[in-house]
Image: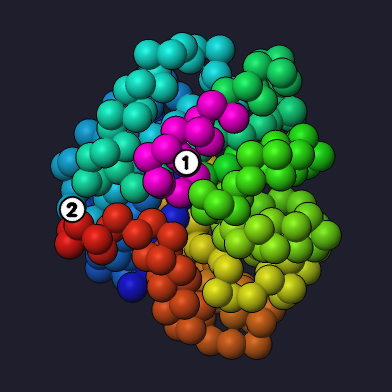
């Protein structure tokens, strides 16, 4: 079944129909969802969602645009939650120079500190990097992230950077953008990267694939992403779904380890 590696179902965009939507995913072929925290408050709402739905798992972390809210207490709470069965990753964490809501040095400091939680708690990370290619790579190298393991979510750079992260043993998250006509770089990455290093994701409620571009996204759209990747690689969408599920279970190992 489809392994959704990155969604935000605690987002207010789903307040009107969250329960109905989540209950509909199984019939659409979605077997596992990683719900990813993006703010300090989102850590709690993400964990609650994972506790409520058996097929939903949580990643706890603070998005670079929100790190101004963080303090040592936030890290300690993340550390405690990381030991819960349904918490399977630290994320999303990283750098975002597009919105520039937080100073770059502050973003880098909290990126490193959250990576340290992942290292200490032996959990994979989920990296967010937008218009911060050089600094993200520098931090990744200096922190030896390949020793921890994780995914660069919503990968938006070219083949050269993809090669760097793949050589570290990281996964690349591919979502609806791969269906866009102007997504030349991502299509090239999808062709270059081995299928064994790719994860399917939506980033719901954002980045819906064609023909739903501009609308609210959800995991039911992932077959469109799998189809696009399959066309690029010359394989069936079913093969894309099968291998990316294996990849997701390998990376987020606690899902099977705890028998959930």
- Asked if 169 appears above or below 218 in the picture, the reply is below
Label 1 CA crowd tier, 10 Å (few <14, some 14–19, many 20+): some
Q: Nearer the viewer, residue 171 or 30?
A: 171
Name which residue lies at 34% across and 47% down: 88
Residue 207 place in picture, x, y as percent: 58, 48
Residue 134 seen by the camera: yes
Relative horizontal placement of residue 192, taking residue 32 as reference (left or right): right
Name which residue lies at 51% across and 78% down: 240
Residue 258 place in picture, x, y as percent: 20, 57
On-image quarter of the N terminus: bottom left
- Asked if 218 appears above or below 49 in the picture, the reply is below
Name the residue that disc number 1 marks.
Answer: 119
Residue 148 place in picture, x, y as percent: 51, 49
Label 2 CA crowd tier, 10 Å (few <14, some 14–19, many 20+): few
Q: Nearer the viewer, residue 56 or 83?
A: 83
Which span is picked out in magenta?
112-125
Name the residue that disc number 2 marks.
Answer: 54
User: Is residue 120 one of those drawn in magenta?
Assistant: yes
Relative horizontal placement of residue 257, taking residue 226 as reference (left or right): left
């Amino acid at each position: 079944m489809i392994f959704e590696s990155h969604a935000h179902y605690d987002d207010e965009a789903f307040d009107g129909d969250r329960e109905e939507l989540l209950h509909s995913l199984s019939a659409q072929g979605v077997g596992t969802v990683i719900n990813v925290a993006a703010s300090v408050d989102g850590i709690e709402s993400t964990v609650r969602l994972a506790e409520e739905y058996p097929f939903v798992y949580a990643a706890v972390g603070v998005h670079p645009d929100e790190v101004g809210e963080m303090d040592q207490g936030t890290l300690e709470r993340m550390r405690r939650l990381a030991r819960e069965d349904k918490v399977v990753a630290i994320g999303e964490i990283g750098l975002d120079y597009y919105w520039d809501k937080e100073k770059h040095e502050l973003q880098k400091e909290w990126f490193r500190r959250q990576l340290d939680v992942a290292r200490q708690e032996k959990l994979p990370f989920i990296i967010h990097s937008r218009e911060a290619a050089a600094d993200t790579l520098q931090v990744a190298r200096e922190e030896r992230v390949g020793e921890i393991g994780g995914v660069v979510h919503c990968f938006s750079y070219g083949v050269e950077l993809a090669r760097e992260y793949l050589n570290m043993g990281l996964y690349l998250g591919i979502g609806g953008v791969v269906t866009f006509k102007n997504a030349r770089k991502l299509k090239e990455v999808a062709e270059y990267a081995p299928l064994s290093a790719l994860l399917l994701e939506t980033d719901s409620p954002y980045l819906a694939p064609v023909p739903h571009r501009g609308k609210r996204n959800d995991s039911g759209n992932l077959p469109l992403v799998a189809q696009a990747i399959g066309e690029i690689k010359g394989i069936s969408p079913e093969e894309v779904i099968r291998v990316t599920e294996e990849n997701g279970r390998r990376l987020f190992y606690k899902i099977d380890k705890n028998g959930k």
